[in-house]
Amino acid sequence: MSQKMDRPKHVGARIQRFEDTRFLSGTARYIDDIRPPNVLHLSFVRAQVAHGKILDIDTSGLEFLDFPVQFFTGADIGDLSIKAHQDFPEMQYSEQPLLARERVRFVGEPVVAVLADDSYQAEDAAEMVFVDYEPLPAVATMAQARDPEVPGLFDGWKTNVFIERQMKGGDIAKARAEAAHVFTRTYSTQRQAGVPMEGRGVVAEYNPSDRMLTVWSSTQIPHLLRTYLSEELGWPESRLRVIAPDVGGGFGVKGQVFVEEVLVPWLALKTGRPVKWIEDRREHLTASIHARDHQHTLEAYVSADGRLLGLKADISVDVGAYSTFPFTAAGDPGMAAKVMPGPYDFQHYEATFRALASNKCPIGTYRGVGRPSAVFAQERLMDDIAKELGLDPIEFRLKNIIREFPYKNALGFTYDPGSYAETLEKIQELVAQDRAAALASRGDPNKRIGVGLACFVEQTAHGTPDFTRRRVPIETGYIAARVEMTPDGQAIVEVGLQNHGQGHETVFAQVAADALGIAPQHVHVRHGDTLTTPYSVGTWGSRGGALGGGAVHMAAGKLADKLKAIAGHLLQADAKTIVLKDGLAHPEGEPGRHVAVAKLARAALRNVGELPQGMEPGLEAQVSLDGPADGTYANAVHAAVVEIDIHSGKLELKRFVVAEDCGTILNPLVVDGQVRGGVVQGIGSALFEHFIYDEDCQPLTTTFADYLMPLAPEIPDIELHHFETPTPLTPLGAKGLGEGGAIGPAAAIANAVADALQVEVQSTPLNANAVWRLSAHARGDLHDG
Amino acid sequence: MNVTLTVNGTQRTITVESRRLLADVLRQEFNLSGVHIGCAHGACGCCTVHVDGAPKLSCLTFAGQCDGKSISTVEVLGGVEAEHPLQAAFRSEHGLQCGYCTPGFVMTLAPFVDDRVAEGRMPDDLEIREAMSGNICRCTGYHGIVAAVRKAIGDRLAKGTQA
């Protein structure tokens, strides 16, 4: 695809992150540190019933306050809304108004916006507003959502199904006919979320002197937000600037456009003053976005000799009250349907997938998007099949794993080369002793040991055709980078990404430094500001390293070519022989005959009389890099070892091992951190995290005392083993990496529990209650507690 | 009410409402952006500062409760270059990603490191993990933070042995 680098020197090196110092010293600037003078603080009155008609909004209490207050309701905002529609005839239309109009559809939905000079006062004022509702029956379950007798949540809806579609490849009837064994199982994964430690927040300010509307938001997608604002507010995009300052974690949560992000700039225009909204934790847990909440029924067709012939999937996701922008209500079920074929060799597949509406918080993207649930179902099924056929679960996988590349799967997606069998064999070797210990524990009266695996491929950095097929209101997935050299020979890299922990400021400096022959410390990477960075889709879909890194490499390569041409001219040498290294340019093999890169930069920008005849002054280049049509496929195997006290249900995670392959490793420090961090979020999915609603759709998990995330003592050291199969599909050979860690743990841990207790595990979370119930058989107590 | 606080070594008397949280007062009155609010209900540890030398959650403390007390925040620990040995260890061991929880972890763990060094012993991993069990990190999976604590203690113990 492009020239490989001459001599990678910094790419692949374990370099400490340049961005760390500001985070460690307290000098980083997050959204709450944006404090324009004369700012109005926004507080919301949010829906307290899950489904209801708004009868009255009583704001008379605000008159008794001894400070100035302004308020706005759904009646004030016209038809401004979040529109996240897919252009399929099967999709029922819906919008989320910025403030509820007439009807509320989930607890936490914004109803009234209250503004005051101080954040404490704004909260006081919001408490003085009373909203009277006529409660309506809540749609609380998947069965209710599919019941045609239950009234639609939106006018004109027939049932509460946002969309139901199919995907298929091969001939599923043929697979069924040829099968010696048919296995049908249902698996479900609970409602949870990414929960970054910094919540959301938005600040907006209009400056009449240059007619610029500036919006700061804790977002992963500044350019997408800018375009949405321009279209929804009817504001020229050239006069809009979106800045994502330091962002305190995203994990996909901050990869949507939210009602608050549109409302705050609208309020700034309306009031003529800067407006600021900082989300509190209760708002975040009830009204940002949730994730997962899948139920999959799989039917597998298996030959007499243990080969998978085909798979049929029925996938339902409770996506909550509204379709989210830009990936829509169909994002999660569609992704699960697409990735279900996984790393196994079979050519007949059929999936029906649907997004079901309910009176719960909307579902959006969270690390893995659909894949953790799909891999949970698929990998639980592999173990259940192996057990019923009396096969070793690893041997059964090895028999079916894809070994020849490129491989075209049943849906027609082409997998680029990976190390599927190698990672699996590595894990087989690493957990051999644990498996022996598990077997030996089978008769133990107190404790049982189990070993479980999850084997998966992950489509990453997918390009434009993947989005076209989905007809989502995001049409592409490219990342752009601009590289500029300053006259002192240092470089500025501007990427259309947002760095919220992924190490962009270091990794892209490494990439540019290799191309330009300068030190990574002399490369300043900027991101997150639409005024200074080229238009791109932002940080999501595991494309930062593969596409962002690739774009930086290509743009820096263009700059390097110009530097070499100038050097050739100044040194009276052939430009093709020039090498850029350690801040110097010299002909290959003649390091003594050199000129400083800084001198070349100075020539390009200031002493332009030294340039070759006819060469244009200036030293910058920009490249936009789209992803490969089908993406590039990373792969991994996760293994968990658990020890279970069958009397209490206490589960101890004794060991967690990962063998993964994300292609070329750009910085091992960052890769290790991304994988481990993802794995621990996945452990949270497997064991703890659960958003619970009652039958009226009242949320019961609204604080960190109820929504339990992994803490340090519960987590073992995560052991990592890297395989490196560079992809020919991206310039540096890198595949996506950020999400993979979170994809496997639920499946691996559930398989370990199934192994320890010799039962089928159908759902997560595997908290102490669930594990205690699953231990009944092991206790010899068949009464279900 | 009037409250006299010594913040990062400088004494100042301010007038605040009795309901104002220490976290908000440090952020707004003292411009200390290193104090982060993660949950405002005492469950995540992001807002940890030292009150008279001991780690305390500034989101569960009213500024009014701190009259006459000495408060330090992450800003004073190692300066703008974050040169405290524990901060350096966070850098070398990749103990942070998005950085939002980081000041809280550093302020929780700095006295833990000091105490272990004073005792002259290296704690085991579980003890280190227990020491940070009041802080939530959503990015790192804790691995790099545990390694940073081990390194910070190990380096200082090694230095002590030489001296």
Image (cartoon, helix red, strand yellow):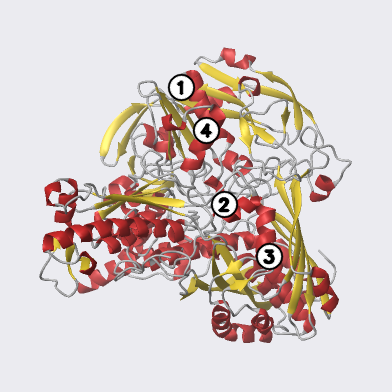
The answer to whether marks 4 and 2 sit on the same chain is: yes
Q: What amino acid does circle 3 point to? A: Leu
The residue to which callout 2 is attached is A194
Mark closer to the observer (3, 2): 3
Q: Residues within 10 Å of mark 4 (few under 14, many from 20)?
A: many
The residue to which callout 4 is attached is A229
Outermost residue, top direction? A63
The residue to which callout 1 is attached is A117
Look at the image and tell me in which quarter the C terminus of chain A lies.
Answer: bottom right
Q: Residues within 10 Å of mark 1 (few under 14, many from 20)?
A: some
First in sequence: mark 3 vs mark 2: 2
Q: What amino acid does circle 1 point to? A: Asp
Whole-angstrom CA distance, mark 4 to mark 1, is: 25 Å
The answer to whether residue A766 is seen in the rendering is no
First in sequence: mark 2 vs mark 1: 1
Whole-angstrom CA distance, mark 3 to mark 4, is: 36 Å
Give the SS element for disc 3.
loop
Mark closer to the observer (3, 4): 3
Give the SS element for disc 2.
loop
Label 1 near label 4: C-beta < 8 Å? no
Look at the image and tell me in which quarter the N terminus of chain A lies.
Answer: bottom left
The residue to which callout 3 is attached is A411
